[in-house]
Image: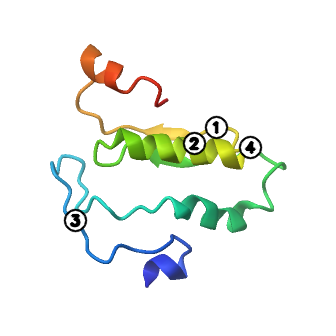
C-alpha cells in the first residue's frame, strides 16, 4: 500500500531476501522500473528549469537492472544521474563485465 500512496509503483507480492546481505538491504525485488515514470509527475514542473539528476544504485549486484534504470533516465531526458556503488569487487575482470552499463 505504501508503494501506491507514494507513487513507487506496485510492490512485490512476495519479498525475496537479498543474498549476499553485504549491502545492508533485506529484499532484492522491491524496485519496480515503473517508479521512474511515476515519479516524473512530481518533477515535471522543474524539468527544463533546472538540472535534474536522479539518484540510483547498483541494487543487489544486478547490472541488468542498472542498465534498465539508466536507459529510462536517458529516455525521459534527465541531465545525468548520481550513481551510488556498493560494489565490493572492483577487479579488472568485474569492471569488464560491467562494460556498456555506465
Residue drawn at (19%, 62%) of the image = 17
The quadrant where residue 7 appears = bottom right
Q: Indicate whether 14 appears above or below 56.
A: below
Disc 4 marks which residue? 51
Mark 2 to mark 1 CA distance (whole Å): 11 Å
Mark 4 to mark 1 CA distance (whole Å): 8 Å
* Residue 91 visible in image: no
Q: Which residue is at the front of the view, 81 or 95?
A: 95
Tell how many labels.
Answer: 4
Q: Mark 4 or 1 closer to N-term? A: 4
Q: Indicate whether 11 appears above or below 46.
A: below
Q: The residue tagged with tag 2: helix, strand or loop?
A: helix
Quadrant where the N terminus sits is bottom left
Q: Residue furthest top?
A: 92
Q: The residue tagged with tag 1: helix, strand or loop?
A: loop
Label 4–label 1 contact, CB within 8 A: yes
Instruction: Decide if residue 66 is on the left or right side of residue 75.
Output: left
Mark 1 to mark 3 CA distance (whole Å): 30 Å
Amino acid at each position: 500500500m505504501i508503494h501506491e500512496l507514494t507513487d513507487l509503483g506496485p510492490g512485490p507480492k512476495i519479498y525475496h531476501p537479498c543474498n549476499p546481505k553485504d549491502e545492508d538491504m533485506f529484499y532484492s525485488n522491491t524496485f519496480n522500473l515503473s517508479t521512474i515514470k511515476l515519479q516524473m509527475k512530481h518533477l515535471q514542473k522543474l524539468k527544463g528549469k533546472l538540472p535534474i539528476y536522479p539518484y540510483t544504485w547498483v541494487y543487489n549486484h544486478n547490472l541488468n537492472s542498472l542498465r534498465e534504470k539508466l536507459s529510462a533516465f536517458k529516455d525521459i531526458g534527465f541531465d545525468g544521474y548520481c550513481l551510488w556503488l556498493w560494489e565490493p569487487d572492483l577487479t579488472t575482470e568485474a569492471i569488464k563485465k560491467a562494460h556498456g552499463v555506465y
